[in-house]
Image (spheres, coloured by chain):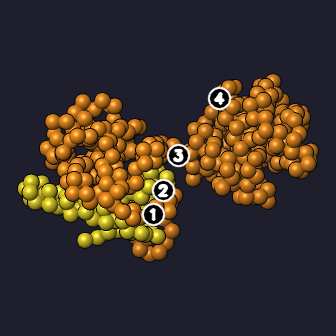
């Protein structure tokens, strides 16, 4: 008998049931090795046995998400596997989402280590890369042969409870998890090596890849400023003296709305900054350096702008995750639209 | 935050000190500010001068909001 037991998940196509016409196939278990499982079994050797294969149609899974997940988790449970493997899904979107969903459920509910695989642009990748180890495959089944050694290595490590190294070493899709380690060379040495390679026009890999940012098309310009309502938003950490919302001085998880109605300028008796990323002495003395209330009030009086929105939105922009900031923006924008604000001045320190 | 707000169709002018960051994140209207610890003004020049600097920057920000742009635009001096 093999030392380690594996249960494998496949869709109707890879499970040999049929194509799109069988995509509503309900979950079933077959106690044998099927399709891509054969390549895995061969790679894994005699110590590992695929004891069962669960097959489910992609449409059935997608349309009966909760029920299908429950059913499949029960099926997996019966076989007490050491590792659960799903797919790989390559670039099949519904299959990728099914693999991710079921892997996440098996790991959470049964505490069994899981691994799946898919193409980096499969919609399942962004949905599940943080939760599940996803072997990076090409976009079609023709790339299975290349993926097998990565699966084999990860399945062995997961079964034995060995440490999984970083995505580049093991060949899985980046999960956005940071792990400390001791590098062979110190930072200055690595930096200079990178620079030399860059100058020589050679490929180099950065220690800190920059996130890719989406673009938003520019909004239309304001035609008549004298009728426009202007709001101020800041990442400069301006808050009332007692910081009532407990906004963090770095890596903020929230923002606040604070009143400026009836105020001619920002006073250090009302407002301060809790920003942990710059020398605060000037702004604590004069918060108008970040929230230019004095100037904007004058322009409001002079009729240069229509009206100043009675609140400003504020958070701390140091060490703050870009996805937190994006969420703040969405929430802030929603309120501003509801309150018919025409334009925003966003001040960053 | 800039893009989250602008996605609703509200024009946003990003007054910021580190213009390359603003470019990277994708702000469409960018006005370079004075310095990180005092984006709008310069307290080392005294209060009156600091106000003048702030007034000029806010004016520029308002101009930026009234300027049609099709791409990322930095409103320099």
Question: CA–CA distance between discs 4 and 1?
Answer: 47 Å
Pinpoint the chain carrying mark 2.
B
The residue pinned by badge 2 equals B9
Question: CA–CA distance between discs 3 and 4?
Answer: 19 Å
Q: Which of label 1 and label 3 is nearer to you? A: 1
Q: In this picture, is A243 found above or below A96?
A: above
- Confirm or deny contact between disc 2 and disc 1 (CB under 8 A): yes
Q: Which of label 4 and label 1 is nearer to you? A: 1
Chain A painted colour: orange
Check disc 2 and report its element: helix, strand or loop: loop
The residue pinned by badge 1 equals A220
Q: Classify residue A190 by image quadrant.
A: bottom left
Q: Are marks 2 and 1 on the same chain?
A: no
Using the rendered image of the protein, determine whether residue A57 is visible from the camera's viewpoint: yes
In terms of sequence position, does the residue under pointer 3 or pointer 4 come before the other?
4
Q: Residues within 10 Å of mark 3 (few under 14, many from 20)?
A: few
Q: Which of label 3 and label 2 is nearer to you? A: 2
Q: Are marks 2 and 4 on the same chain?
A: no
Give the chain ID for the yellow colour: B
In this image, A236 relative to A324: left or right? left
Question: CA–CA distance between discs 1 and 3?
Answer: 36 Å
């Amino acid at each position: 008998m093999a030392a380690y037991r594996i249960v494998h998940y496949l869709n109707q196509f890879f499970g040999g049931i049929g194509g799109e016409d069988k995509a509503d196939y309900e979950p079933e278990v077959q106690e044998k090795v099927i399709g891509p499982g054969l390549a895995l079994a061969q790679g894994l050797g005699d110590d590992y046995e695929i004891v069962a294969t669960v097959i489910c149609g992609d449409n059935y899974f997608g349309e009966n998400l909760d029920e299908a997940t429950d059913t499949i988790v029960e099926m997996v449970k019966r076989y007490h596997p050491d590792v659960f493997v799903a797919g790989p899904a390559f670039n099949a979107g519904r299959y990728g989402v099914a693999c991710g969903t079921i892997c996440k459920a098996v790991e959470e509910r049964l505490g069994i280590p899981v691994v799946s695989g898919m193409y980096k642009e499969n919609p399942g990748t962004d949905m599940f890369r943080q939760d599940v180890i996803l072997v990076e495959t090409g976009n079609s089944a023709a790339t299975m042969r290349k993926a097998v050694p990565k699966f084999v290595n990860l399945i062995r490590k997961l079964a034995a409870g060995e440490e999984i190294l970083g995505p580049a070493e093991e060949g899985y899709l980046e999960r956005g998890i940071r792990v400390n380690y001791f590098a062979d060379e110190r930072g200055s040495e690595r930096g200079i090596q990178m620079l030399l390679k860059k100058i020589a026009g050679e490929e180099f890999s950065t220690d800190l890849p920059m996130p890719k940012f989406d673009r938003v098309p520019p909004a239309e310009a304001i035609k008549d400023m004298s009728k426009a309502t202007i709001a101020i938003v800041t990442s400069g950490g301006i808050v009332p003296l007692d910081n009532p919302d407990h906004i963090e001085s770095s890596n903020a998880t929230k923002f606040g709305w604070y009143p400026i109605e009836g105020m001619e300028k920002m006073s250090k008796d009302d407002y301060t900054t809790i920003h942990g990323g710059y020398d605060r002495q000037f702004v604590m003395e004069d918060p108008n350096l970040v929230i230019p209330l004095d100037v904007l009030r004058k322009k409001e009086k002079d009729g240069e702008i229509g009206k100043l929105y009675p609140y400003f939105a504020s958070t701390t922009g140091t060490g703050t995750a870009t996805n937190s900031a994006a969420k703040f923006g969405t929430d802030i924008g929603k309120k501003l639209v509801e309150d018919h604000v025409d334009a925003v001045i966003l001040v960053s320190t | 935050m800039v893009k989250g707000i602008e996605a609703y169709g509200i024009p946003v002018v990003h007054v910021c000190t580190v213009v390359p960051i603003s470019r990277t994140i994708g702000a469409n209207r960018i006005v370079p500010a004075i310095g990180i610890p005092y984006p709008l003004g310069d307290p080392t020049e005294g209060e009156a001068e600091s106000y003048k600097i702030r007034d000029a920057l806010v004016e520029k920000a308002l101009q930026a909001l009234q300027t049609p742009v099709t791409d990322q635009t930095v409103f320099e001096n």
